[in-house]
Image (cartoon, helix red, strand yellow):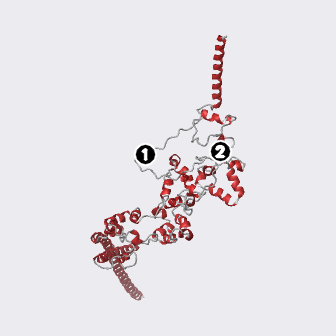
Amino acid sequence: MAKHARWYAVLALLLLALGTGAALAWAAPSGDEAPPIPHPTEGREDCLKCHGPEGFKPYPADHAGRPVESCTVCHAAPRAEPTPTPEAGAIPAPTPLPPNLAPVPTPIREPVMFGENTCVSCHKGLGGAFARIVDDWSASAHAARGVGCVSCHGGDPTQKDKEKAMSPQAGYLGPLPKEKIPGLCGSCHARVDLMRQFGLPTDQFSQYWESVHGQALLEGSRDVATCFDCHGGHRTLKADDPASDVYPTNEPAMCARCHADSEKMARYGLPTDVEAKYAKSVHGRKVLEEQDLRAPTCSTCHGTHGAAPPGVTEVANVCGQCHALTEQRYLEGAHRVAMVAGREDAPRCVTCHGHHDVQPPTRDLYMGSEPGHCGQCHGSGPVADQVASIYQLLQEADQAYAQAEATIALAKGQRLIMAAQEEQLQRARSALIQVRALQHNVDVEAVRAKVQEAVEGSRTALEGAQAALQDVRIRRIAMVISLVVIGLTVLALYYIKRELDRELEERRARARERTQ
C-alpha cells in the first residue's frame, strides 16, 4: 500500500508540473518574448483600466478572458532607477515645507488617455464654464502629451455614474485650494524621471517657495500668483508658443493682470503703473513694438518661478547680465567703491537710468541737475569739472562720427564705392560703443584715450569720403570743360563746312555761266 502511495505522489507531481507549464504557455504570447511594461505600475495595478477592450491601447484578441493578475506573469514591471543624489554635505539642505504644501501625489501620475472619458463628455454637456475647461485643456500642451483630467484631479473617467467617477475610492481630488496648486504641479514637474525626456527643469517647485509669491502664499495670502495663474490655467501652452501667456511679448500683460490691479496692490503698497512705464521704455518698445526677444521682460530681471525684486546692491549684477561690459566698467569706478564703502547715496544703475521706465541714455545726462543727471549730486567743484570734461569729449566723438557718417552717405548717394571708408567708420563706431561703457568708470583720462581713438577713426573715414567727393567734383569740372571744347569744335566745323559749301556753290555758278 505504501508502494502505491509513492507512485500516486509522483503522478500528482507530474500532473502539477504539466498544468503549470500549460498555464504559462496559455498566458504567454506566441513568438517573441512579451514586451515589458513601459511605465511605473504604482497607482496602476488594474492594467485593464487602460488596456481593456475600450482602453486607449487594448490588449490583443488572443488575450481575451485573461485575469488582470496574469499580466505580470509575462510582462515584467520596470525597475525604478533611483534619482542620483549629491554626496552628503555637498549642498545645503533645502528648507522643509509645511506638510500641507508638499507635492500632492495623484492616483495616476503618468500621461494616460482613455477611449471614453466621462470627465470630458460630462463637462461638455454642462456647457458654459465647464465646457470651456475642456476646450482649454484640449488646446493645451498637457493634452498633446496625454496628461488628462485624472492626472491632476484623480477620479475614474471610465465610470458613467457621477458618484463612482468622483468617489474617494477612485482617488478623486477635485479642484484643489490655491495653496495646494504648486504642490500639484510639482508632483510631476519636480520629478527628474518625468521631466528629463522633455528637457524641462525640475527646480521650479523649490524656487517658487523662495519667491515673493511663494512666501506670501505661505503667509496665507490668496492674491499671489501660482502656476495656474501665470500659465493659463487648463490652457497651459509651451513657453515658446507665441500664444502662451508667458511668451516674452505677452508676459508684461500677464504680470499686469495682478500688478495693475489697484485694489490688490494697495494691500501691499505696490505701484500699479509698472506695465505702462515698461511699455514706454527702451526695453518695452523693443519687445512689444519691434518683437525683439533679446530685450528684457519682467522675468529677465525679477526671475520666473523664483520671482523677487532685485536688492539695492544686486541691481548692477542684474543689469550686467545683458550689459556685461558696462557692468565691468562700473565695478572699476568710484561709484562702485562708494557703494561697497556703505554710502547710501552712491549711484546704482537705476539712480541715473530709472527702473521700469528706462529711456535711451544720451550725453545730456551729464548736464543739468534734474533727477538722474550728474548735477543732481555734483553741482559744483572738481568732480563737476570732470563731468563737464567727459561731456565735451563725448560731444566731440559724437559730432566727428555724425559728420563722417553723413559724408559717406552723400558719397554713396553719388554712386561712389565707400567700402574702405565704411570699414574705418565701423572701427570708429566700435570705439564709440566702448566709450559708452567706459564712461561708467568715470575716469576722464580713460574716456579721453578711447574718445581719441573714435575721433581719429571717424576723421580718417571722413577724409577718405571727402577726397572721393573732391575727385568727383574735379572729374565733373573736367567733363564740363571737355563738353564745352567738343561743343565749340563741332560748332566751328559746322561754320567751316557751311563756308566751304557756299564757296563750292559759287564756283559751280561761275562754271555754268562760262558754259553758256
Query: Residue drawn 40% across and 47% down?
Result: 90
Q: Nearer the viewer, residue 145 or 427?
A: 145
Q: How far from the left and from the top, in percent, is residue 71?
A: 63, 35
- Residue 480, compared with residue 145, is above or below; it is below
Q: Position of residue 191 (x, y in %)?
A: 52, 48
Instruction: Check the picture and name the quadrant holding the N terminus.
Output: top right
Relative depth, front residue between 486 and 336 = 336
Q: Amino acid at mark 1?
A: Pro
Considering depth in this image, is 271 or 237 the residue closer to the camera? 271
Task: Decide if residue 420 is in sight here.
Answer: no
User: Looking at the image, is mark 1 or mark 2 earlier in the sequence?
Assistant: 2
Residue beneath disc 2: 56
Name which residue type carries label 2. Answer: Phe
Label 1 or label 2, whichever lies nearer to me, is 1
- The quarter of the picture where the C terminus appears is bottom left
Q: Would residue 242 appear left or right of 370 to someone viewing this image?
A: right
Q: Residues within 10 Å of mark 2 (few under 14, many from 20)?
A: some
Asked if residue 5 lies left or right of residue 299, the reply is right
264 lies above or below 84: below
- Residue at image x 47%, y 62%? 308
**Percent x, y for residue 22?**
65, 26
C-alpha separation, residue under disc 1 versus residue under disc 2: 39 Å
Write down the quadrant of residue 351 in the picture: bottom left
| Helix, strand or loop at mark 2 | loop
SS for dot 1: loop
Quarter of the image where one finds residue 482: bottom left
Residue 86's disc is 1
Q: Is residue 62 above or below residue 266?
A: above
* Callout 1–callout 2 Cβ contact below 8 Å: no
